[in-house]
Image (cartoon, rainbow, N blue to C red):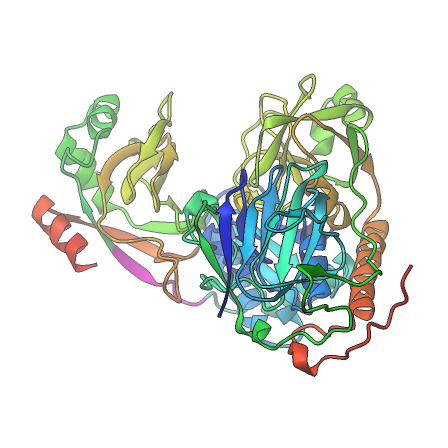
């Protein structure tokens, strides 16, 4: 399916697939992001300053002193026509340890109550699914994850918390996410990972990128602290 | 290494450069100077590359002491800078100024505009984080320990300033010395209304016909809830006819979003790279510096333009920046000792 290509102001282009969040669009987004990033090293596309994948779109920013919107759109169209049949490449699979102790899971009881499930059953179903990073956003390194079992979907809290601890694993509507920094937030917190999702000091600052597959692995409070000390 | 010491910190002064656009895909805002034209102009006047870090002062400036002889340039908003240690001399803007060792300069409250930029030859050499020295306050990273300047801070200046400037206007004995010429600065908004040219947003037609008309016809107050992330604007609420939820998508500096409460938000340098609100307009790149100079209490007016005009206005600005190099005779990134001694431009 060919996406639409439209301007986002005078120095960015938004490539948009029809407004449904399904696996095929996800694959197209991942594939084209990969190609646009990879051509970043070749002459022509090196002129893109940023490639930002989202659920059903990719936003490409360019430098207005080097090209016009028309030129940027043409470059992207050419890339699209060349890459339509390429395989998307296998996504990376990343395991994320999570401690579900009530110490770290202030909303687990609410989630369990709403769906009339035992705590253990919520955790079991949550762990049983495989997740896909659809977008990194909200704050540096925050992954929006699809793949949450539909029976665990829980609306955002009516009043957001002013401070959600870093590493909190949470459910927001039909999606899961991990707070990469201490920020305000309204998602339901069901656990916490000791992993650092964002570290500005290293070459690859984010643990996860759009397209990665995520599996959660349960750990105890002791293991949580051991992981944390090791980092 | 040369040092600039903060004698008294201003309201909100941060180290800024051109930001870190390549990290938008990880949820990291681009950041960098709000008024990139003035940032770059200041750098060009002292022979820096556009990527060198400057200080961005907001509404009320700092008092600074230059511990070594330094070539500086001040651009952007008018903060009426004066020397304070010997006699009170007014320090001119929009031209290179040579400052003798020990000189103190006080930047006062902004008379016009909102943000001024101070460049030093060699740039402020705080550590690079993710390819940039810009301060990202929301993530407490970059700049000087990820925060605004405080009284007592010491800012290191890049090595390239170690060569003695031999530019013709320099008088070694004077606290400050400068040439007669100056370059054309950004036109600062005069009066209460700042006019910004926009391109239509993808969702502008989702507003009621009456709201579409009002968006082009009315002025929007820049509220006190305005900062480096964005400006919250106030007017009678604009009505979205299509209120369906949308998935988050890419945004840009200059994007005007319309949340369900009907009060538009103009996204600025530190805005998140993606957003889930409808996009009703985009301020053109050439007018983002003017937007950066608007202050709370002023009004914004949006006037529609075309893609072609947006690019041609941007290219005119680039030409103005190139002119600054011709005037200063300082080629970006070339050591001062290797530079021409006579500025090419004639005094006005």
Q: Is residue A91 magenta?
A: yes
In which quarter of the view is residue A49 placed?
A: bottom right
In this view, which residue lies farthest toward the bottom? B338
Residue at coordinates 62% horizontally, 25% vertically from top-left?
B223
Q: Which residues are magenta?
A: A89-95
**Residue A98 vs residue A1: left or right?**
left
In which quarter of the view is residue B311 placed?
A: bottom right
- Viewer-side residue, B237 vs B269: B269
Q: Position of residue B344 (x, y in %)?
A: 86, 73
Q: Is residue B269 magenta?
A: no
The total number of labels drawn is: 0
In the image, residue A97 sits, relative to residue B305, either above or below, namely below
**Residue B106 vs residue B129: left or right?**
right
- Viewer-side residue, A225 vs B290: B290
Residue A150 appears in the figure: no
Q: Position of residue B266 (x, y in %)?
A: 64, 36
Q: Position of residue B156 (x, y in %)?
A: 48, 63
Q: Position of residue A113 (x, y in %)?
A: 21, 22
In the picture, which quadrant includes the C terminus of chain B?
bottom right
In the image, residue A208 sits, relative to residue B49, either above or below, namely above
Residue A8 appears in the figure: yes
In the image, residue A41 sits, relative to residue B73, either above or below, namely below
In which quarter of the view is residue A37 placed?
A: bottom right
In this view, which residue lies farthest toward the top? B236
- Viewer-side residue, B144 vs B110: B110
């Amino acid at each position: 399916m060919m996406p639409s290509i439209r301007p986002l102001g005078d120095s960015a282009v938004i490539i948009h697939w029809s407004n449904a969040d399904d696996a095929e669009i996800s694959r197209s987004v991942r594939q084209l992001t990969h190609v646009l990033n990879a051509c970043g090293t070749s002459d022509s596309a090196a002129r893109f300053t940023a490639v930002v994948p989202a659920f059903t779109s990719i936003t490409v920013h360019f430098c207005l002193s080097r090209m016009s919107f028309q030129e940027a759109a043409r470059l992207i169209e050419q890339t699209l026509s060349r890459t339509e049949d390429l395989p998307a490449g296998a996504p990376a699979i990343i395991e994320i340890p999570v401690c579900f102790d009530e110490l770290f899971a202030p909303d687990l009881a609410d989630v369990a109550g709403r769906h009339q499930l035992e705590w253990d059953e919520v955790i079991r179903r949550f762990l049983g699914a495989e997740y896909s990073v659809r977008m990194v956003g909200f704050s540096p390194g925050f992954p929006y994850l699809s793949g949450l079992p539909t029976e665990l979907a829980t609306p955002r809290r009516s009043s957001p918390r002013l401070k959600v601890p870093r590493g909190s694993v949470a459910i927001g509507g039909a999606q899961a996410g991990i707070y990469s920094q201490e920020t305000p937030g309204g998602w339901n917190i069901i656990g916490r990972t000791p992993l650092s999702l964002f570290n500005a000091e290293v070459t690859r600052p984010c643990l996860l990128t759009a397209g990665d597959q995520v599996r959660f692995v349960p750990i105890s409070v002791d293991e949580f602290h051991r992981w944390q000390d090791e980092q | 290494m040369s040092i600039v010491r903060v004698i008294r910190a201003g309201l909100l002064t941060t180290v800024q450069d051109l930001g870190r656009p390549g990290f938008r895909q990880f949820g990291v805002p681009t950041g960098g100077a709000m008024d990139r034209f003035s940032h770059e102009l200041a750098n060009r006047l002292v022979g820096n590359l556009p990527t060198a870090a400057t200080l961005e002062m907001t509404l009320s400036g700092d008092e600074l002491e230059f511990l070594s002889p330094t070539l500086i340039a001040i651009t952007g908003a008018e903060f009426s800078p004066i020397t304070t240690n010997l006699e009170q001399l007014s320090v001119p803007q929009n031209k290179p100024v040579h400052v003798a060792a020990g000189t103190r300069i006080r930047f006062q409250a902004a008379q016009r505009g909102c943000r001024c930029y101070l460049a030093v030859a060699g740039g402020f050499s705080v550590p690079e984080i993710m390819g940039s020295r810009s301060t990202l306050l929301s993530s407490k990273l970059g700049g000087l320990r990820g925060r605004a300047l405080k009284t007592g801070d010491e800012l290191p200046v890049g090595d390239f300033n170690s060569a003695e400037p031999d530019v013709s206007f320099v008088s070694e004995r004077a606290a400050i010395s400068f040439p007669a010429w100056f370059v054309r600065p950004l036109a600062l908004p005069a009066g209460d209304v700042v006019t910004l040219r926009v391109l239509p947003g993808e969702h502008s037609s989702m507003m009621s016909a009456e709201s579409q008309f009002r968006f082009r016809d009315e002025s929007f107050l820049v509220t006190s809830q305005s900062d480096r992330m964005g400006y919250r604007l106030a007017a009678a609420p604009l009505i979205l006819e299509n209120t369906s939820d949308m998935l988050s998508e890419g945004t840009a500096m200059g994007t005007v979003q319309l949340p369900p409460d009907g009060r538009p938000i103009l996204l600025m340098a530190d805005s998140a790279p993606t957003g889930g609100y409808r996009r009703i307009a985009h301020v053109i790149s050439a007018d983002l510096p003017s937007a950066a100079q608007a202050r709370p209490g002023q009004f914004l007016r949006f006037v529609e333009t075309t893609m072609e005009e947006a690019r041609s206005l941007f290219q005119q600005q680039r030409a103005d920046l190139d002119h600054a190099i011709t005037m200063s005779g300082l080629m970006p990134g070339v050591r001062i000792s290797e530079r021409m001694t006579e500025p090419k431009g004639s005094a006005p």
